[in-house]
Amino acid sequence: MPKDRVESAYRVRVEAAAAGRNRHRNPHISNADEQRYAGANYPMSFTKGLDHDEMTGVIKQASHFEAFRGAIDEGRIEPFTMRVPVPVMPEHARRKWEAPTAGVVYDLQGPDPQAVTMAPAPDLRSAELDFEMAEVYELALLRDVPLTSFDTGGGTSEAEIDGAVNRLNAMQYASDGFQGRPRKVASSGQLDRQTVFRGSAPGVEAGPYLSQFMWIGTRDQAGGTDLEDGLISYGGQAIDQRVLQAENGDDYMTRWTDWHKVQQGFDVNHCGPGQALDAARCFIHRPRDLATYVHYDALYQAYLNAALILLGMGTPFDPGFANLSGMRNTFSPSGSADGTAQNTGGFALYGGPQILTLVTEVATRALKAVRFQKFNNHLRLRPEALAGRLARAEEIDAAYPATSHAFTEMRDRMMPTLTAIDAANGADADLPNGNYLLPMAFQEGSPMHPTYGAGHATVAGACVTILKAFFDTGTMLGINDEGGCNDGKAGFYRKISEGVHYLPTKDGKTLNSCPIKHPLTLEGELNKLAANISIGRNMAGVHYFSDYYDSLRMGEEIAIGILEEQALCYSTDDFVLTLATFDGGSVRIGRK
């Protein structure tokens, strides 16, 4: 390699390092519930895998949590085994804490895992926590309601979802106008079937609840499949969008003895899977199906699928980038309509392989950053654990004056939702004050790491940001009749003759194309995809809304940092992209 090339490559690396060093960094701040309730054996902290009291559900010894916290702060693997006391059980039956030291490693691209952060999570006495815990409970009650009922005009009114909407609208956080982490609402300022559980980014409230990228496929090379077949061309193979099915009402951890065993860290799945699944596959048509998808997905899976769909459709690239990728038919330096036929196109550079690589590569950076937030910063308890606190509120508040009746007061504020949960769970002799345990979609409940931030949501924010950077997010889903190779094909285009969308039948067996008056935009469907995957975890019972909201934005920040550093590597043609953010703004990325 010539010496001047060696020096210029070195300068690019130094420039990228300087960009990382000079980025604004916010301090890492938690909601202080860990310290506030230390005298009650840390009931608002993640303690899964430690030894829990059979009567209160909180840990038996505060020192056990403190040893756990010490191991986290030390940042090495060995102390978690040698210094943290855990319940005695057969070795093969113990679940392991997942990657508690990932946040202390360094990375060579994008923001350092500790250079990004998340706001404090809602604390125990906040109206926001009341509301988002009620959301998780309500989603558990709705797991088998068709997703079409989550759309205004998408089907007959379902009493279950209407009841959930009414109960949520009656809560203080809704009455106060969703201050903090806002929800999508109807023109009345309240939730309705079209806006409830939708997420927060632009376009998520438009059209069907589920993103089209969770249903549609592509035309294959032989012309044997089309979008409604739900088969995505992956080279000469195909990815099937249909998922395995769990039975209606197939929930777990609704008995205190089961709940307690899971909190102890017992691997209830060591002799089998975490869900009873039917081998017959279906298109996602219930919240339970979406929960199953996010139980077994490969984290970046949905976004890799979306990238394959968009590339297979020939979706237009970002206008500022289209010249480099060869997506323009003509090249005109003056910007006029006339120009010379372009002779270059993207592949290894500015094309499909670069996008496919980046959309998966960002996932590992996102996971490292969110692990630091999970373990080192927030250590927030999972919804299943908070439900246990509400089920044992009387016992906890009586045993620990440090809680100042916080759990009984929270329980009483949530009573309309908890009454519905109690009726669904049925009586449990171990819970004489009401069975308020959260019905879980998975036998093992949540993973063995804290809830805030959410790994799925951080990866969603990072991966979708890559897609929004490279593709023209203003395109619409519809039929193109402009001529050429796209004649009469459905896809995302700048100009369409007819808007369409795709919906599964009531049983999820087939997918049908439907005309639509207001076409769906690529921005909205990508934002919706990120929300679906993230909130799909809420549907399973393992996350709160704030986990989605803040993690999504942290993932976006990570992806933007990576793209900014990538832009430094192009010394000839300008690498310029504009992406729409999850908050409705835009970011322009390129060499400054």
Image: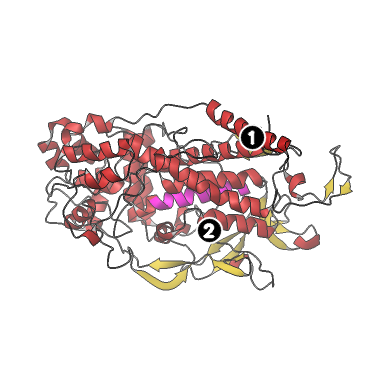
Gap in angstroms between the C-alphas marked 2 and 1: 42 Å
Element type at mark 1: helix
Three-letter residue code for mark 1: Tyr
Main secondary structure along the magenta-highlighted residues: helix
In the picture, which quadrant includes the N terminus? top right
Q: Which residue is drawn at 13% across and 50% down?
A: 54
- The 10 Å Cα crowd at callout 1, few under 14, some 14 to 19, many 20 or more, is few
- The 10 Å Cα crowd at callout 2, few under 14, some 14 to 19, many 20 or more, is many
Seen in the image, is 400 located left or right of residue 446? left
According to the picture, the residue beneath numbered tag 2 turns out to be: 214
Q: What colour scheme has been applied to the protein in the rendered image?
A: secondary structure
Say which of 475 and 191 sits in front: 475
Q: Which of marks 2 and 1 is in front?
A: 1
Say which of 273 and 1 sits in front: 1
Element type at mark 2: helix
Q: In this view, does 81 lie above or below 255?
A: above
Q: Which residue is drawn at 22% across and 46% down?
A: 82
Q: Is residue 250 above or below residue 116?
A: below
Asked whether the viewer can see residue 121, the reply is yes
Q: Residue at x 42, y 26 (%)?
A: 27
Callout 2 touching callout 1 (CB < 8 Å): no
Three-letter residue code for mark 2: Met
According to the picture, the residue beneath numbered tag 1 turns out to be: 10
Quarter of the rendering containing residue 64: top left
Q: Residue at x 20, y 34 (%)?
A: 406
Asked whether the viewer can see residue 167, the reply is no
Residue 529 painted magenta: yes
Instruction: Give the image location of residue 199, x and y in percent.
Output: 47, 44
Say which of 298 and 305 sits in front: 298
Instruction: Give the image location of residue 399, x and y in percent.
Output: 10, 37
Instruction: Give the image location of residue 24, x and y in percent.
Output: 51, 26
Magenta range is 518-537
